[in-house]
Image (cartoon, grey):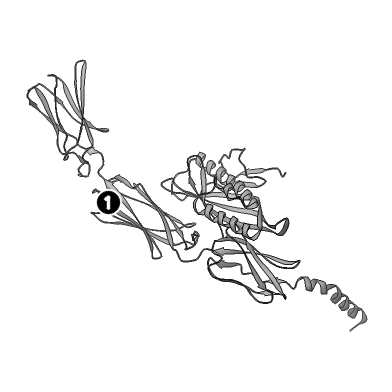
Amino acid sequence: MIRRLLVFACALALPLGLRADQALVQVEPPNLQGSRPLEPLTASSVVRDYLQSWTAFRAALNQNQPRLLSQDFVGTALTKLSHTIAEQNKLGLHTRYVDRSHHLQIVFYSPDGLSIQLVDHVVYDEQVIEGATVLATQPVHTRYLVVLTPSQTRWQVRFFQATTE
Amino acid sequence: MTLGRKFLLAASALFSAPLLLAQSLRMNLPAQVAAGSALSVPTSGSGQGTLTIVGPGQAIRRQVRLGSPASVPAGVLYNAGEYVAMLSSGSDSQIGLFEVTPAPQPSTLSFLAEPSRLPVDLQDGISGTVYVFDVYHNLIVSPMPVSFDLTASSGPSQTRTVTTRYGVGWTRMNSAPREGSAQFVARAAGISSTRVVDEVPGDPCNLSMTATPVGGKAKLQTAPVRDCSGNPVPDGTVVTFTATWNGGQSTVDVPLKRDIAQVEMPVHPGATISVASGVVAGNEIHWSGR
């Protein structure tokens, strides 16, 4: 197993036990443009919960098991990913996502404290598999826009969309 | 042409033939396609093939006649994101990457106004946050003006226009000086979303009472209780009268009724009577019993 590596680009303290599997994680200081002050503890919780969501994302899309998403994803993100899994199942496909690096920055914290948005410049490999046959392996460099909302115990991904860099 | 050059050409043709066959399967993917638009991918080759498109947003497959464009009809590929496309035929395949971008026209505003109820005359007391989505619920990332209008039942309306950043726009507004329901409207590219904000009177201001003797008791009555903007404080708001004397204290809680609170309570001569509502204290009266 590739050793996990975590790089801190700011004072955000990510709990060491909660890193993204096998991925290099870099966290930039928030760039909120005055929306609402962000406590460091909140910021680190958001980053931690977002990185955990990638674990669920990888497992769910690889095993075609939408229930694996339910702890980390809600709303539109959960609906869309579950729909993709249903389509994969129908086609006899599954996908293996291997995230290589995340470069994160929190860019918005709503004035009411009910949503937070981050940008993730992510590098991952997408492997499309049919049965036991790997149809394609494609490295992807993209930028995800992610909106998280608080639940009782954690931040959950409500919106998860790759966009042009 | 020299003999050596002829030999090189022949050798080149011989070795490149299988390569040409292997490369005959080709597709010309666009870098981007808008969500919900038809996708046409020119292909080369012959026979039947399969176009498979997979990403976190969707997974679809289409049969293709090689040499003709592979087409995905409008409305089929609609979730924005990065996709891997594979054109395959037998053991040959070609892989590419393209992006589905959000449709340019907004369709839905996800508008959250907070709080839904607040005191009047509060600076930056109301916040509005808008996420702008297309018809497929993709976040429209390109900057876009969003206007916020807060119109109270009385008084002038407030308007702010902001430009979205990463698909989100937000603002803060002041609550009106007069109580009532306010319409909070967010608009972007002809789409609007409305929330209602109840602006209610604030804490009592200048709380004052009078005391008059009635049959051996003190009749205590407040002046009409208003907030600092002159709005009547709602009926039911509790006003507390307290009489304090040497070694003793008596307290009565009275709800406001038609703007005033009144009660008759026994009070020791020489006691001090005070009135308060919440954290707001009113005047004090030294009770002589007459």
The N terminus of chain A sits in image quarter? top right
Image point (44%, 62%), residue name: B144
Relative to A116, A81 lies left or right: right
Quadrant of res A126: bottom right
Judge whether A99 appears above or below B81 on screen. Answer: above
* Horizontal and vertical percent position of residue B234: 22, 41
Tell me what residue is drawn at x 56 percent, y 57 percent. Answer: A83
Residue B210 visible somewhere in the drawing: yes
Left or right: residue B128 versus residue B205 is right
| Image quadrant in which the C terminus of chain A is located | bottom right
Residue drawn at the location 41% of the way across and 65% of the way down: B189
Q: Residue at x 51, y 41 (%)?
A: A154
Q: Residues within 10 Å of mark 1 (few under 14, many from 20)?
A: some
Q: Which residue is mark 1?
A: B181
- Note whether residue B28 is visible: no
Looking at the image, the residue that sits furthest to the top is B247
